[in-house]
Image (spheres, helix red, strand yellow):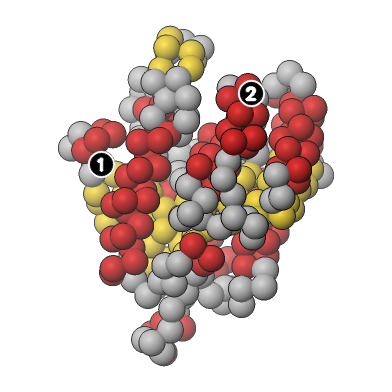
Amino acid sequence: MMETWKLTIPELSGDTPRRAYVYVPDSFGEDETQRYPVLYMFDGHNVFFDEDATYGKSWGMKDYMDFSETQLIIAAVECNHSPDGGRLSEYSPYDFRARGLGNLKGRGRETMEWMVNEFKPYIDEHYPTLPERETTFIGGSSMGGLMSLYAVMEYNAVFSRAACLSPSLWFSVAKLDEMIREAKLQGDTVVYMDYGSRELSFHPNMERQFTRIASQLIHKGVYLDCRIVPGGNHNEASWERQVPFFLNTLLYDKE
């Protein structure tokens, strides 16, 4: 079952509507007492359907979920498409300067406060979720991958597992170090983190930074599934190929 509707996030983008997507396994139609873990995702318009995706290619997750019969709800919200850096602002935990856009306010905390205090309660009320932390996950790519890492570090009481695909770890390096160092994590925290081999050269010292963050997470006690994807690139076609890998990590020992 796939549902799509429009919502607004007044504290982030006023009355500008954006799409929300929720996937529920077909097995719910056969047994309405069944409940499922939930994966919250960023850039919802890129997750399911090519016709909605920014560059005409999605992760194809509905097709994969139907084919694999994966027992998981996915709840995803479209990003802010404002040309003045709306997505970058909402998906950044920290203030920053963007090329061509000047100084931008990082509104990642506001984004997560909305997700945790408004969107998640709505999903838990209207869909057959297992709402506990142990069965609540978060995932995304690029800046959405950075936000997924931020979410599992800073909102660890809500999310127990995160999928961080091609995360923007080049961003605010010192603040990322501080975030991981000071995070209060429960002992069962799981992170899937990958980076494509072809995108390693996109930012200076990216291989070193990826290694540093991985080491810090392990030192922090995180159960880390970490990959450099052979031939992997920074696009939806590449991230689509990683869907089986990160879902296996998120659902490991949960099914």
Earlier in the chain: of badge 1 and badge 2, it is: 1
The image position of residue 169, as x and y in percent, is 64, 30
> What residue appears at the point 47 percent right and 25 percent down from the top-left corner?
94
Q: Quadrant of residue 22?
A: bottom left
Image quadrant of residue 106?
Answer: top left
| Looking at the image, residue 241 lies above or below residue 203 | below
Helix, strand or loop at disc 1? loop
- Classify 70 as above or below 120: below
Which residue sits at x=71%, y=50%? 221
* Outermost residue toward the left in this view: 15
CA separation in Å, label 1 and label 2:
29 Å
* Residue placed under numbered mark 1 in the picture: 9
**Crowd class of label 1 (few under 14; some 14 to 19; many from 20; radius 10 Å):** some
* Residue for badge 2: 173
Instruction: Please state which amino acid type lies under the numbered disc 1.
Output: Ile
Q: Quadrant of residue 146?
A: top right
Identify the residue at image location x=58%, y=25%. Answer: 175
Q: Is residue 120 left or right of residue 26?
A: left
User: Is residue 181 found left or right of 81 in the rendered image?
Assistant: right
Question: Alpha-carbon neighbours of circle 2 within 10 Å: few (<14), some, or many (≥20)?
Answer: few
The foreground one among 205 and 116 is 116
Q: Secondary structure at mark 2?
A: helix
Q: Position of residue 238 (x, y in %)?
A: 67, 46
Mark seen at residue 52: none
